Amino acid sequence: AGVAVQGLMPFELRAAQGSFQMVPFAGFEQGSMMVNLQSFLEKVFLYGSLVWLVGQAGGSTAFSLLFGLVYSTAIEVAQMFIVGRTAESTDPVLCLVLGVSLLALERHYRNQDRAQAAPVPA
């Protein structure tokens, strides 16, 4: 809920639909690099936590990846109608990268656990 509230503030609708920036991370090329880095790290934490927590709540990692992707895309689409917000593909792409990374880590550790649990032939 915090991610949605932060992404949709100031809750002031615009008269016409805004544009959607398809190039990921294009917004990070403007303004202060320190502020952009802080925003990037915050998004990595928030979306990474979202995907991880949904997976820990009982969903599979693939479901949590899909949930995070749909959730972040819905926020970006809603930003097209809010004053002062620029909708872009950065958050869904970031969520996708984090989810795929978590899937890869999960598979790696699952295979590692199987290798350790396998009986050693005598």
Image (tube, helix red, strand yellow):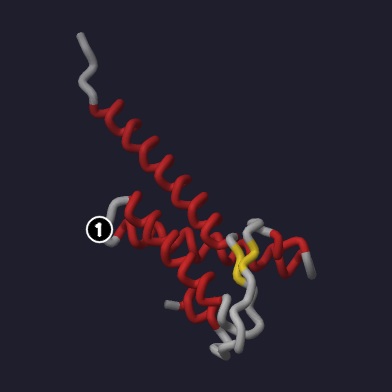
What is the crowding at mark 1: few (fewer than 14 residues within 10 Å), some, or many (at least 20)?
few
Locate the N terminus by quadrant.
bottom left
Position of 44 with respect to 84 (left or right) is left
Secondary-structure class at tag 1: loop
> In the rendered image, which quarter is residue 103 located in?
top left
Between residues 71 and 60, which one lies in front from this camera angle? 71
Q: Position of residue 97 (x, y in %)?
A: 52, 50
Q: How many marks?
A: 1
Give me the residue at 28% from left, 62% from top.
57
Q: In which quarter of the image is residue 66?
A: bottom left
Whether residue 23 sits left or right of residue 64 in the image: it is right
Give the camera-side residue of 84 and 80. 80
User: Which residue occupies the foreground of this view, 45 or 119?
Assistant: 45
Left or right of 67 on screen, residue 21:
right
Callout 1 amino acid? Gly
* Rendered location of residue 65, percent (x, y): 40, 54
Q: Which of 104 and 15 is in front in this view?
A: 15
Horizontal and vertical percent position of residue 26: 70, 60
Which residue occupies the extreme top position in the image?
122
- Tell me the quarter of the picture where residue 43 sits: bottom right
Q: Relative to 91, does residue 77 appear above or below in the rendering?
A: below
Quadrant of the drawing holding the C terminus: top left
Q: Residue at x 64, y 57 (%)?
A: 24
Residue with the mark numbered 1? 58
